[in-house]
Amino acid sequence: MKYVKEAGIIFGMSAAGEVLNQLLPFPVPAGVYGLFLLLICLVIGVVKLEMLEVTGNWMLDAMPIMFLPACVGIMESFGELKAVLVPFVVIAVVSTVLVMSVTGLVAQWIIRRKGGDRS
């Protein structure tokens, strides 16, 4: 029953994000609205981390499976991709490095801000 409750909270936030996506005129995906709602609820204490931890960890463990259809799609359309392979790889590498760098800098900033300087 605990898993059903945890999944219900997570999917409920996603559903609320879908509603916000329909109501608000901004070009933001519904999933982003749902994630922000969940973040706000976690920060203000409406939802405790312990209320989501087990199901959230399971979802993170299962997440790589969700990338398989996209990988298969790329492999199936490799003929069309060959013409733009170099720009595709450059964009993928640059964006990956950029996201990793920004994430690391933000994590360091948060750790220092909380007083746990681990340099």
Image (cartoon, rainbow, N blue to C red):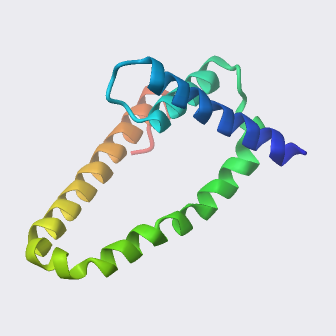
Residue 93 image offset from top left, x and y in percent: 21, 64
Q: Is residue 42 left or right of residue 87?
A: right
In this view, the residue in front, 106 or 115, is 106
- Name the residue located 43 percent from the left edge and 32 percent from the top edge: 110
- Name the residue located 41 percent from the left edge and 35 percent from the top edge: 29
Q: Is residue 7 left or right of residue 73?
A: right
Residue sticking out furthest to the front: 22
Q: Quadrant of residue 19?
A: top right
Q: Is residue 14 above or below residue 102?
A: above
Q: Quadrant of residue 95?
A: bottom left
- Name the residue located 32 percent from the left edge and 53 percent from the top edge: 100
| Total number of numbered discs in the rendering | 0
In this view, the residue in front, 100 or 95, is 95
Q: Is residue 112 left or right of residue 14?
A: left
Quadrant of image for the C terminus: top left
In this view, the residue in front, 17 or 89, is 17
Q: Is residue 81 above or below residue 25?
A: below
Residue 42 image offset from top left, x and y in percent: 63, 26
Quadrant of image for the N terminus: top right
Residue 17 image offset from top left, x and y in percent: 53, 29
Residue 40 image offset from top left, x and y in percent: 56, 22
Q: Is residue 6 left or right of residue 67?
A: right
- Name the residue located 49 percent from the left edge and 38 percent from the top edge: 31
